[in-house]
Amino acid sequence: MQIIAKCPGCGNRWLLDAWAADRRIKCPKCHRLFKIPKLDEVPKATKVIRQAKGPVYVDQTGKTYG
Ligand SMILES: [Zn+2]
């Protein structure tokens, strides 16, 4: 399971693993810190890709269990 998040600084889209949900990451290009939302609070700028591996569970810290 992966997340596509758009950097609010430079507009680049980054493919992230699910662990990034509900955490701050640093953009590899412009080095801006931005927040990755929880998977159940995903805004329009972020897409969640669900792979066909069965259910994925997310806890309060953003960790996932597949
Ligand atoms: Zn950026």
Image (cartoon, grey):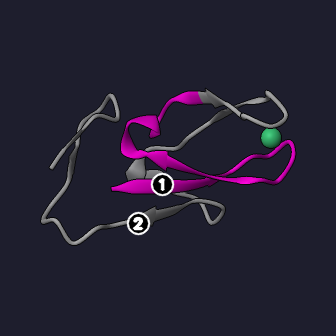
- Distance Cα–Cα, label 1 vs label 2: 6 Å
- Figure quadrant of residue 28: top right
Q: Say few, some or many: other residues with alpha carbon within 10 Å of mark 2 (under 14 / 14 to 19 / 20 or more).
A: few
In this picture, residue 66 sits left or right of residue 45: left
Task: Inspect the magenta stretch and tell me whether residue 19 lies in it.
Answer: yes
Disc 2 is placed on an element classified as strand
What percent of the width, then of the height, locates residue 45?
A: 66, 61
What percent of the width, then of the height, locates residue 24?
A: 59, 28
Task: Inspect the magenta stretch and tell me whether residue 40 lies in it.
Answer: no
Disc 1 is placed on an element classified as strand
In this picture, residue 50 sits left or right of residue 21: left
- Figure quadrant of residue 17: top left
Q: Say few, some or many: other residues with alpha carbon within 10 Å of mark 1 (under 14 / 14 to 19 / 20 or more).
A: many
In this picture, residue 1 sits left or right of residue 8: left
Badge 1 or badge 2: first in the primary sequence:
1
Residue visible at 85% across and 42% down?
9
Q: Identify the image quadrant of the N terminus.
A: bottom left
Residue 35, placed above or below residue 55: above
Q: Are marks 1 and 2 in contact (CB under 8 Å)?
A: yes
Look at the numbered disc 2 and say if its residue's Cβ is closer than 8 Å to ligand 1: no
**Which residue carries the number 1 mark?**
3
What's the residue type where badge 2 is placed? Ile
What percent of the width, then of the height, locates residue 56?
A: 19, 55
**From which residue to which does the magenta span run?**
1-24
Residue visible at 47% across and 53% down?
41
What's the residue type where badge 1 is placed? Ile
**Which residue carries the number 2 mark?**
49
In this view, the residue farthest toward the bottom is 52
Residue visible at 24% across and 36% down?
59
Residue in front for this viewpoint, 40 or 9 = 9
